[in-house]
Image: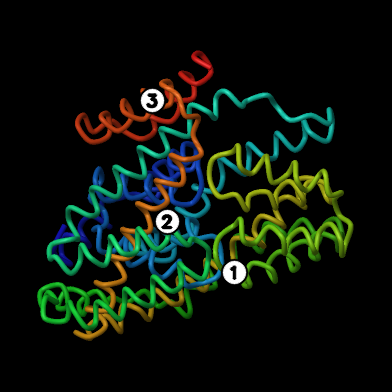
């Protein structure tokens, strides 16, 4: 899909229901952290459905990395906006969060009723090597299409080694900045004039973002506001504002954010005990989708289903709105040759970062022949036979349950 005309035709033909169903499947199978979810998104939207290009996905990952909020959900909001404007962003973001929201809502009910976590360790032992295979497959596909010059390979490999050896949020920011500078210095002469012309055409598309953002805000706020009118509850508002306030201070991913949540919900407000908080984080890790879905667990403890909705919307909505706001203006800036060179460098760095994430996942897997078999079969299925990710994860979980 190289022309704006083709993109518009695809947008017209791609129904919102199909988008919803696609991202519902993604949200149901994206175990293993934000890079796993992003890799599944790349597999569906770029490799299978051809709705976005690798360049566009990498731009979204780059922007989400330097903005506050859960990276994966912000990338999904970005992808939906690229495909079908604000309505697409609402549909895709809602669909990708919904499976983990419903699952953790059920698990929260069972937890507070019985006080125990489900025994699913063996299933997730099967998930981990499959997740590593998914991330590696996404890295190979994006690298094949993006890395064309020796300088681009150098940027990607340098990012891989830096993140693998040093790690941490500050290393991530350093990689983004350094990759951008390297792109400006090394890749300016290789900038694709055709792509810049395309970006200029895209930037002229009218999404009416400042006005239509009200649509993006209206649905989730109504989900909280209308029940409040009926119940008169103020704790739901407090849950929403508390999590919304924290969400715009989230830099570096969900795990970096955990201490801040703990400080506020355990020490400041006493909404949950320390043990309940730790168990809530554990539930967030064993469900598909973003780890910050643990906010649902806390909201449910305080105010039932309505509290779960308020906390969930609070943690995800403000960063997504900021992401779309920046995406809107990024289009207008991408007609610059210098900025395109910077973005090229950042894309190369992001590919290296994704590869580093795969190494982390591999290291966390059980080191035995079972994990090796699941990993190799999953990777071969993705690369050679083009099997859909929606089948890879469940089958791997069943194998883990049977073999461990």
- Sequence-wise, which precedes: disc 2 or disc 3? 2
Dividing the picture into quadrants, the one containing residue 179 is: bottom left
Q: Could you tell me how far apart the alpha carbons at marks 2 and 3 are, in whole angstroms?
A: 23 Å
138 left or right of 100 in image: left
SS category of the residue bearing label 1: helix
From the image, state whether disc 1 or disc 3 is nearer to you.
3
Count of numbered labels shown in the rendering: 3
Residue at the spot 68% in from the left edge and 24% down from the top edge: 119
**Contact, mark 1 vs mark 2 (Cβ under 8 Å):** no
Q: Which residue is mark 1?
A: 318
Q: Position of residue 275 (x, y in %)?
A: 82, 44
Q: Position of residue 206 (x, y in %)?
A: 32, 77
From the image, state whether disc 1 or disc 2 is nearer to you.
2
The quarter in which the N terminus is drawn is bottom left
Q: Position of residue 283 (x, y in %)?
A: 67, 39
Decide which of 24, 193 is in the foreground and name it. Answer: 193
Q: Which residue is mark 2?
A: 164
Residue at the spot 64% in from the left edge and 67% down from the top edge: 247
Q: Which residue is mark 3?
A: 374
Asked if 89 appears above or below 121 in the picture, the reply is below
- Sequence-wise, which precedes: disc 1 or disc 2? 2
Residue 263, which numbered label? none
For label 3, the crowd category at 10 Å Cα-Cα, with few meaning under 14, some 14 to 19 and many 20 or more, is: many
């Amino acid at each position: 899909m190289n022309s704006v005309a083709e993109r518009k035709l695809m947008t017209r033909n791609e129904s919102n229901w199909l988008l919803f169903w696609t991202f519902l499947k993604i949200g149901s199978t994206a175990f293993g952290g934000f890079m796993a979810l992003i890799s599944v998104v790349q597999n569906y939207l770029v490799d299978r459905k051809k709705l976005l290009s690798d360049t566009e996905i990498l731009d979204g990952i780059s922007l989400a990395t330097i903005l506050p909020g859960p990276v994966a959900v912000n990338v999904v909001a970005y992808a939906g906006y690229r495909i079908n404007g604000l309505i697409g962003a609402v549909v895709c973001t809602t669909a990708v969060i919904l499976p983990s929201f419903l699952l953790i809502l059920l698990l929260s009910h069972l937890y507070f009723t019985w006080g125990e976590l489900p025994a699913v360790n063996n299933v997730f032992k099967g998930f981990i090597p499959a997740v590593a295979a998914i991330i590696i497959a996404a890295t190979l596909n994006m690298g094949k299409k993006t890395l064309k010059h020796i300088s681009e390979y150098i940027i990607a490999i340098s990012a891989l080694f830096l993140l693998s050896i040093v790690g941490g949020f500050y290393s991530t920011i350093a990689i983004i900045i350094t990759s951008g500078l390297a792109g400006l210095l090394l890749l300016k002469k290789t900038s694709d004039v055709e792509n810049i012309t395309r970006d200029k055409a895209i930037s002229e598309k009218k999404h009416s973002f400042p006005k239509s953002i009200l649509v993006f805000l209206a649905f989730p706020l109504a989900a909280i506001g209308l029940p409040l009118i009926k119940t008169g509850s103020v704790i739901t508002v407090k849950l929403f504002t508390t999590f919304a306030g924290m969400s715009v201070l989230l830099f570096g991913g969900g795990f970096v954010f955990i201490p801040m949540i703990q400080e506020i919900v355990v020490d400041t407000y006493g909404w949950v005990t320390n043990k309940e908080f730790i168990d809530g984080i554990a539930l967030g890790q064993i469900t598909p989708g973003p780890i910050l879905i643990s906010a649902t667990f806390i909201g449910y403890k305080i105010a039932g289903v309505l509290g779960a909705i308020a906390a969930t919307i609070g943690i995800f909505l403000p960063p997504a709105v900021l992401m779309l706001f920046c995406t809107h203006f990024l289009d207008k800036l991408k007609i610059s040759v210098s900025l395109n060179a910077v973005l090229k460098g950042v894309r190369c760095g992001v590919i290296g970062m994704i590869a580093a994430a795969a190494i982390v996942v591999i290291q966390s897997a059980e080191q035995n022949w079972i994990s090796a078999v699941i990993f190799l079969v999953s990777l071969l299925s993705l690369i050679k036979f083009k099997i859909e990710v929606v089948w890879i994860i469940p089958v791997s979980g069943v194998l883990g349950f049977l073999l461990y």
